[in-house]
C-alpha cells in the first residue's frame, strides 16, 4: 500500500548480535556530545524528583510546599514550544547552542537563590532551555542516524543520560557534609559549559533540515497547520502522553517521599536508585533498539502498561513490593522516553518536527504538574497513594488510543513527507 510503513522482520527472534548497534564514526560524533548534554538535563530533572526533601529543607519549606514549586517549575517547559519553533525556522544547530548555554548559566545561578521564590523563577527559566535541548537532541538523532539505528541511538542517549540520576543519588550522600548544602547540586551543573565550545566547533546542521530548507519547506506561518489525518494522529499521541505524564511525575515524586519519610529509608533509598540502574538501561534498550525491530506502537503500549504495574506495586502499602515496583517504574519511564522521541520524530515532517516534539514534551510536563497539584490538593482528604493508583488506571486505559496510529519505525525523514497509514 502506498506510503505504508511496516517493520521488516517483525516477530522474528532477535539475535544477540542484533542487540548491538554499530554506529559509524559520523554518527558517534553526533551522539556522544548530545549524550553529555543529556546527562546534565537528566541530572537537573533528577534533582527535583530525588533530592526534593533535601532542597525543601535547605530552603526552609515543607515537601508539600516545595512540590507546588516543582509543579510551577515544570511549566517552564511550555516555553520550549517557542524555542523549538525557532529551531524549525532557523535550524537545529543555532538553537541547540543557545539552549545549552542558557540552561547551564541559569542552573548554576540557582545555587545563589536565597529563597523558594527566586529558586522557582530561575528554575522556570532554566526549564525552558532544558526542554529545548532535550527535544532537540532527539530531533537531531532522528535526522542524522540511519533509519534502522534511529531508536537505538535515542536509546543510547537515554542510557548515558540516565547516569545523571546516579550523580544526584551520589551527591545525596555527601551534600550534608559540605558547607554548600543543597547548593552543591547546582554548582556541579556548570560543567556543560565545556560542551558548548565543542558543539560550536563540530556540530553541523542536520541533513534533513538542510534538505527541507533547500526545498523551501521551512518557511511556514508561525504556527503551522496540519492535514486532518496528521492532526488526528497528534491528538491521539498527546492523549497517551498526557496520561503517562500525570502518572510518571506524581509516582516518582511521592515514591521518593514514601521511601525517605514514611519508610525511613534515607540511605537505603539511594541504594535503591543505584540498584534500579540496570532496569533503567533495559528500558532504554526496549524503547530504543527493540522498537527499531518490533515497532514503536507495540513497545509504547507495553511500556505504558509496565508503568502502571510499577505504580501499583510501589503504592500498594507493602514495603516488600516497593523495590520491584520502583524497578518497573524506572524501566518503563526509560522505555517511554526513548520510543516517544523516535515515534514523534518520525510521525511528522522536518518542518514541524521540533515544534510538535516540543508540544508532546510540554503535554507530558503540564500533565505531570496537574498530577502533582491534584495529588497535593487532595492530600488532606485522600491518601496520595490512592490518587497515584487512580492515575495508573488512567494511563493503562489510554493505550487504546494507540490502535489508530500508524507504525513509523524505519520512516524516511530526509525526503518530502509521505502519508503514513494505519496497518
Image (cartoon, rainbow, N blue to C red):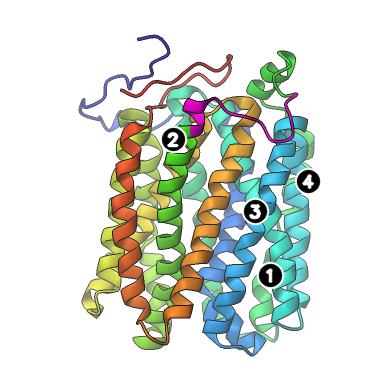
- Which dot marks residue 98? 4
Residue 143 horizontal/vertical position (percent): 58, 27
- Which dot marks residue 78? 3
- Which dot marks residue 152? 2
Residue found 42% across the figure and 51% down from its top = 334
Q: Residue furthest top?
A: 2
Q: In this view, does 310 lie above or below 118?
A: above
Q: Is residue 360 above or below residue 123?
A: above
Label 1 vs 2, first from the N-terminus: 2
- Which dot marks residue 313? none
Asked where in the image residue 1 lies, by quadrant, the reply is: top left
Circles 1 and 2, Cβ within 8 Å, touching? The answer is no
Cα distance between the residues tagged 3 and 2 = 28 Å
Mark 2, residues whose alpha carbon is within 10 Å: few (<14), some, or many (≥20)?
many
Residue 407 horizontal/vertical position (percent): 37, 27
Asked where in the image residue 401 lies, by quadrant, the reply is: top left
Label 3 vs 1, first from the N-terminus: 3
Cα distance between the residues tagged 1 and 2 = 31 Å
Is residue 257 toward the left or the right of residue 403 in the image? right
- Where disc 1 sits, the SS reads helix
Label 4 vs 2, first from the N-terminus: 4
Is 95 in front, or is 374? 374
Question: Is-magenta flag for residue 350?
Answer: no
Residue found 35% across the figure and 24% down from its top = 422
Q: What stretch is highlighted in magenta?
A: 219-231
Q: Is residue 99 above or below residue 17?
A: below
Q: In this view, does 163 lie above or below 315?
A: above
Amino acid at each position: 500500500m502506498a506510503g505504508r510503513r511496516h517493520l521488516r522482520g517483525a516477530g522474528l527472534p532477535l539475535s544477540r548480535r542484533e542487540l548491538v548497534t554499530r554506529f559509524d564514526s559520523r554518527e558517534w560524533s553526533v551522539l556522544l556530545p548530545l549524550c553529555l548534554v543529556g546527562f546534565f538535563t537528566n541530572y537537573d530533572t533528577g534533582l527535583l524528583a530525588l533530592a526534593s526533601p533535601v532542597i525543601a529543607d535547605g530552603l526552609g519549606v515543607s515537601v508539600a510546599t516545595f512540590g507546588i514549586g516543582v509543579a510551577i517549575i515544570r511549566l517552564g517547559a511550555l516555553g520550549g514550544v517557542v524555542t523549538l519553533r525557532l529551531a524549525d525556522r532557523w535550524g537545529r544547530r543555532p538553537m541547540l547552542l543557545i539552549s545549552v548555554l542558557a540552561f547551564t548559566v541559569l542552573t548554576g545561578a540557582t545555587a545563589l537563590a536565597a529563597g523558594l521564590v527566586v529558586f522557582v523563577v530561575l528554575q522556570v527559566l532554566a526549564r525552558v532551555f532544558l526542554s529545548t535541548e532535550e527535544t532537540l537532541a532527539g530531533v537531531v538523532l532522528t535526522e542524522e542516524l540511519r533509519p534502522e539505528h534511529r531508536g537505538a541511538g535515542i536509546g543510547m542517549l537515554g542510557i548515558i543520560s540516565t547516569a545523571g540520576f546516579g550523580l544526584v543519588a551520589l551527591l545525596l550522600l555527601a551534600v550534608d557534609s559540605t558547607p554548600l548544602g543543597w547548593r552543591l547540586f547546582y554548582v556541579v551543573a556548570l560543567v556543560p559549559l565545556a560542551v558548548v565550545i565543542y558543539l560550536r566547533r563540530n556540530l553541523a546542521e542536520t541533513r534533513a533540515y538542510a534538505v527541507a530548507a533547500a526545498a523551501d519547506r521551512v518557511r511556514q506561518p508561525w504556527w503551522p497547520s496540519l492535514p486532518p489525518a496528521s492532526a488526528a494522529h497528534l491528538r491521539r499521541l498527546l492523549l497517551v502522553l498526557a496520561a503517562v505524564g500525570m502518572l510518571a511525575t506524581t509516582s516518582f515524586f511521592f515514591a521518593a517521599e514514601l521511601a525517605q519519610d514514611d519508610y525511613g529509608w534515607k540511605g537505603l533509598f539511594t541504594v535503591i536508585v543505584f540498584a534500579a540502574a540496570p532496569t533503567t538501561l533495559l528500558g532504554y534498550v526496549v524503547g530504543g533498539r527493540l522498537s527499531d525491530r518490533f515497532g514503536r506502537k507495540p513497545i509504547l503500549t507495553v511500556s505504558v502498561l509496565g508503568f502502571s504495574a510499577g505504580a501499583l506495586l510501589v503504592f500498594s502499602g507493602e514495603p516488600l513490593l516497593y523495590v520491584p515496583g520502583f524497578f518497573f517504574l524506572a524501566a518503563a519511564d526509560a522505555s517511554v522516553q526513548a520510543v516517544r522521541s523516535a515515534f514523534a520524530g518520525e510521525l511528522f515532517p522536518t518542518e514541524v518536527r521540533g515544534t510538535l516534539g516540543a508540544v508532546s514534551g510540554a503535554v507530558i510536563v503540564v500533565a505531570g504538574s496537574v498530577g502533582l497539584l491534584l495529588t497535593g490538593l487532595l492530600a488532606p482528604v485522600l491518601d496520595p497513594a490512592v490518587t497515584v493508583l487512580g492515575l495508573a488506571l488512567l494511563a493503562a486505559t489510554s493505550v487504546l488510543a494507540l490502535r489508530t496510529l500508524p507504525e513509523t519505525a524505519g520512516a524516511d525523514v530526509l525526503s518530502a513527507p509521505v502519508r503514513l497509514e494505519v496497518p
